[in-house]
Image (cartoon, helix red, strand yellow):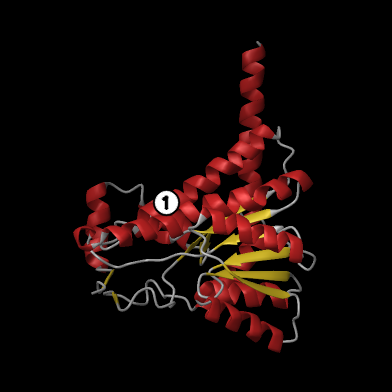
Amino acid sequence: MFLLAEIFVLLFKVLYYICESVVKLFAPVKAKSVASEIVLVTGAGHGIGKELAIGYALLGATVVCWDINEKTNQQTKNEIKKMGKDSIHAYRCDVTNREEVFKVAEKVRTEVGDVTILINNAGVGIVKTLLNYSDDEITRTINVNVIAHYWTLRAFLPSMIEKNHGHVVAVSSLLAIVTLMYATVYSPTKSAVRALMESFNEELRLSSKGKSLIKFTTVFPTLVFNGMLKKLVMRFPSLISPLYPKKAASLIIDAQRKNYRERGIPSHMLPLLSLFRNFPNKAQECVKDFVNLSAEPDN
């Protein structure tokens, strides 16, 4: 009898949360304020990272820019200051270097305060066939796109857990859902990011017995004009319109402020590609051949 009662309660909860999700598709979700938050953005020297830093600064947040390129990172800081926003800080940091991450993180804590929103944005992509990658290119892509997330999470999560307040955003890619040619290193790293975010969210949910208020958001951008792809090859360009970094950053900030667990950038792409993944393999291949989406490889 007790088991039947538990099953009934389970079915009721599942139905309730399904209905709740359907309602949220049509009801507007209120975006939370970030004005009192300390936001750290990795890869802030260019592309989406730069636009994320600008976007959060304009919303009144204190922004911390991290990038391995000190010159471009400083340029981001200077541009934001010219907009009249003084709560902006820039630090050179190689996010693949564990010791450096912890050293610079401590400096941020001392000079700025505890980071409350961590944006793991830094990423690299090399467009080559698997056998044409150098060993260093494979290692660096994995280190930047995946391993760096572990170091930043371990550096900043303890203070979030202690205060039971914070938000972690990870930039994955739609290529984590549907892969293409020349993505034999990039796509697996972005799939790993999704799994990492899911796993740690579940770990924190269970270890806190459901009391954790720390939020996790994984975003899956479509192709972005950020210099990573030299030339896109596509039979029907209008089917997938690549975004510019400013628009992508705006949608990422919106997903974070509305506490989405996962969000396609743009939003309709993630459910469409997730559905596509359930097609038979041969059917997927037929669609890919018809669309003929690819990119010219790097030299």
How dense is the environment of label 1, judged by Cα within 10 Å: few (below 14), some, or many (20 and up)? some
Please provide percent x and percent y for residue 133. 25, 62
Q: Is residue 167 left or right of residue 136?
A: right
> Would you name the residue on which mark 1 appears?
191
Q: Quadrant of residue 292?
A: bottom left
- Residue 241 visible in the snapshot: yes
Q: Is residue 281 left or right of residue 3?
A: left
Please provide percent x and percent y for residue 191. 42, 51
Measured along the vertical axis of the image, is residue 285 above or below residue 66? above
Between 102 and 189, the one lying in front of the other is: 102
Helix, strand, or loop for circle 1?
helix
Measured along the vertical axis of the image, is residue 251 above or below residue 275? below
Q: Quadrant of residue 199?
A: top right
Outermost residue, bottom side: 82
| Three-letter amino acid code at the position of disc 1 | Ser
Please provide percent x and percent y for residue 139. 35, 56
Outermost residue, top side: 1
Measured along the vertical axis of the image, is residue 279 above or below residue 207? below
Residue drawn at x 51%, y 77% is: 46
Between 150 and 24, the one lying in front of the other is: 150
Between 112 and 179, the one lying in front of the other is: 112
Q: Quadrant of the N terminus?
A: top right
Please provide percent x and percent y for residue 140. 38, 60
Q: Quadrant of the C terminus?
A: bottom left
Residue drawn at x 29%, y 68% is: 127
Q: Quadrant of residue 110?
A: bottom right
Between 53 and 222, the one lying in front of the other is: 53
Outermost residue, left side: 131
